Image (cartoon, helix red, strand yellow):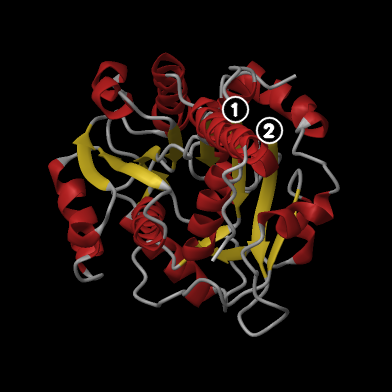
């Protein structure tokens, strides 16, 4: 027990000490109330366009998986598809992951809209802060030309260089979808106040004579023209140019992600390496990493390919490490502009960036 003291001096000291303790405690409590609480990171509202396609559907699935693992990261995952059939395709693909949508802490929505009809995009972009664009014109192979190619190969013992021809549905060619359709999305993003756009484009944007351009309506060149619009729009952006996507359209062969060493480059220089394939799963992961790490990805434009499975070291998931070999370089396209000028004169593509 403590000693008590009834002397006047002790009484005065005890009274003073008690008031001091009470005052100090009150001051601390007041200070705590006055100190601002640290705001929590706002959950991201994300839109994936082209979600009915193979790559877009994988991006959606991986966003749902990320949301399940980190509920604090995402508030809304919205998907833009062109038709009801595309919506059914997306849901069927997601259905392979049991209960993913129902168990997701993020709200999940599917909106139907056509990028070639800008007014139809408003509901999709409303309230959105982050966008991953994976829309693309879809070439259809001419069966007659394919039969001719096969015949020529047989007759010449595979020495024939004949290529098949392709066509597009009405209103869905590269100029309308990959240029006007993408620029319509950029405009909708500006109106909505989007904070970051991740654009999935394609390699071969500097090669007017590449098969993708000469036989598919200059599809990559129109994509590149759209990129130029995005770069000058003022929107924060990341542009990814994947190599050939695995699995190929219509292929039943799986191409799992996370099993390959990824490589980045600029201005199609990776074409010289001969490694011209990359799994869609890995592309989707890179897209989401760019969205989550804008301090690393903003203003970046790069090519993406991979080594064959089993060679090298699989990507660790670090965006900083992935982009480090670029040493800050981005795709510029400047060396290809003279070639694009000639295409401009023939009316085959349109303007160039610089």
Give the SS element for disc 1.
loop
Horizontal and vertical percent position of residue 304: 65, 55
Residue placed furthest toward the right: 327
Horizontal and vertical percent position of residue 210: 64, 47
Residue placed furthest toward the bottom: 310
Q: Mark 2 and 1 residues: CB-CB less than 8 Å, in contact?
A: yes
Residue at coordinates 24% horizontally, 24% vertically from top-left? 123
Specify which label sits upstream in the sequence, 2 or 1: 1
Residue at coordinates 51% horizontally, 28% vertically from top-left? 30
Q: Which residue is mark 1?
A: 236
Left or right: residue 315 compared with residue 93: right
The image quarter containing residue 213 is top right
Q: Residues within 10 Å of mark 2 (few under 14, many from 20)?
A: some
Residue 255 image label: none
The image quarter containing residue 90 is bottom left
Q: Quadrant of the C terminus?
A: top right
Residue at coordinates 52% horizontally, 58% vertically from top-left? 285
Whether residue 202 is visible, yes or no, is: no
The image quarter containing residue 132 is top left
Horizontal and vertical percent position of residue 232: 64, 18
Q: Nearer the viewer, residue 220 or 40?
A: 40
Q: Nearer the viewer, residue 107 or 214?
A: 107
Looking at the image, residue 47 lies above or below residue 225: below
Q: Nearer the viewer, residue 203 or 313?
A: 313
Looking at the image, residue 34 lies above or below residue 268: above
Left or right: residue 256 compared with residue 308: left
Give the SS element for disc 2.
loop
Left or right: residue 349 compared with residue 146: right
Q: Quadrant of the N terminus?
A: bottom right
Q: Residues within 10 Å of mark 1 (few under 14, many from 20)?
A: some
Q: Which residue is mark 2?
A: 299
């Amino acid at each position: 027990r403590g000693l008590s003291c009834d002397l006047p001096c002790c009484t005065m000291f005890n009274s003073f000490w008690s008031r001091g303790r009470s005052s100090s405690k009150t001051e601390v409590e007041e200070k705590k109330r006055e100190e601002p609480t640290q705001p929590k990171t706002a959950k991201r509202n994300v839109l994936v366009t082209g979600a009915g396609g193979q790559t877009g559907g994988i991006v959606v699935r991986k966003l749902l998986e990320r949301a399940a693992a980190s509920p604090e990261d995402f508030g809304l995952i919205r998907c833009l598809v062109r038709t009801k059939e595309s919506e059914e395709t997306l849901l069927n693909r997601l259905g392979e992951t049991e209960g993913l949508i129902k168990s997701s802490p993020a709200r999940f929505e599917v909106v139907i809209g056509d990028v070639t009809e800008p007014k139809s995009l408003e509901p999709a972009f409303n309230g959105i802060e982050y966008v991953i664009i994976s829309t693309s014109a879809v070439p259809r192979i001419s069966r007659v030309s394919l039969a001719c190619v096969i015949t020529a190969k047989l007759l010449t013992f595979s020495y024939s260089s004949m290529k098949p021809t392709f066509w597009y549905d009405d209103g869905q060619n590269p100029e309308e979808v990959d240029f006007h359709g993408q620029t319509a999305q950029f405009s909708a993003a500006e109106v909505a106040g989007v904070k970051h756009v991740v654009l999935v484009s394609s390699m071969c944007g500097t090669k007017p004579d590449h098969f993708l351009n000469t036989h598919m309506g200059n599809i990559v060149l129109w994509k590149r023209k759209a990129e130029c619009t995005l770069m000058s729009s003022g929107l924060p952006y990341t542009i990814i140019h994947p190599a050939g996507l695995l699995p190929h359209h219509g292929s039943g062969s799986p191409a799992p992600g996370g099993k390959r060493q990824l490589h980045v480059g600029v201005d199609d220089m990776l074409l010289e390496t001969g490694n011209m394939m990359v799994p869609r799963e890995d592309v989707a992961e890179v897209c989401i990493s760019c969205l989550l790490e804008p301090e690393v990805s903003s203003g970046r434009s790069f090519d993406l390919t991979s080594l064959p499975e089993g060679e090298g070291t699989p990507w660790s998931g670090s965006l900083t490490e992935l982009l480090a070999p670029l040493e800050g370089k981005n795709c510029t396209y400047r060396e290809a502009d003279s070639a694009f000028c000639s295409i401009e004169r023939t009316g085959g593509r349109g303007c160039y960036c610089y």
